Amino acid sequence: MTQTPEKVILGIDPGTSVLGYAAVRMCGKKCEMLAMGVIDLRKCKDVYLKLGRILERVASLMEAFHPDEIAVEAPFCGKNVQSMLKLGRAQGVVIAAAMMRDIPIFEFAPLKIKQTVTGNGLATKEQVKRMLVRLMKLDEDKLLPYYDATDALAVAYCRYLESIPGSLATKTLNTGETHKNKKSSWADFAAMHPERINSNPTLRNNKKI
């Protein structure tokens, strides 16, 4: 059996007001959180100064954690064009910082992240957070009160699952498609995490976490 090498994944949830980040270490089929936090840019009013600060802070995170990969959440395709433009700019700066250091970049749509972490592409941010606490055995009371940070952790965890050889997450994430059949979706989820399905009956019934 091929042993998955140890590596560090830096997850980023782009934003020009609050940017979330999380670093995780993957060793085989184990994943542990190294750090998580936010870059608060709300006091900065100049859009270009914000982008410059994102570049500086993200670069410092890369220097601190020496990530082998960068996992970035893709902008959500909503009705607010201006919000999408701002998120796209922030994401572009993060990608540029990674490219300058020759760090591989992986991009994941919000729906795909939720589907992979919780088994439900329509899960709320709170549900994603609770599932991450359960999966990674985190102390919820010590987590930051920012969903930007837990979203960043979710994208890093999503990349971790994709990295496991033979994982069903690999097929789900690489095809760019989502399951239209809920039974098929939950069958895949149950196959990936049987211990969670057996111990938590609410997941079997597709109820809120």
Image: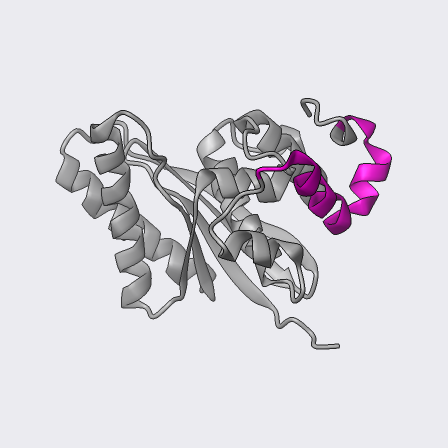
Report x, y in % for residue 122: 54, 29
Residue in view at x 29 percent, y 31 percent: 17
Q: Nearer the viewer, residue 139 or 101?
A: 101
Residue 138 in view of the camera: no
In screen coordinates, is 79 left or right of 26?
left
Quadrant in the picture for the N terminus: bottom right
* Residue at x 52% of width, y 37% of height: 150
In the displayed structure image, the side of residue 60 where residue 187 appears, left or right:
right
Nearer to me, 110 or 20: 110
Vertical placement of 47 versus 165: above or below? above
178 magenta-colored:
no
Residue 188 part of the magenta-drawn span: yes
Colour scheme employed for the rendering of this structure: one colour
Measuring from the top left, give residue 79's x and y in whole percent.
Answer: 28, 25
Q: Is residue 37 left or right of residue 84?
A: right
Above or below — where is 104 with respect to 193?
below
Quadrant for residue 201, please give it: top right
Q: Which residues are magenta?
A: 180-202
Q: Main secondary structure of the magenta part?
A: helix
Residue furthest to the bottom: 2
Q: How many marks are shown on the rendered structure?
A: 0
Image coordinates for residue 178, horizontal then vertical, percent: 53, 43
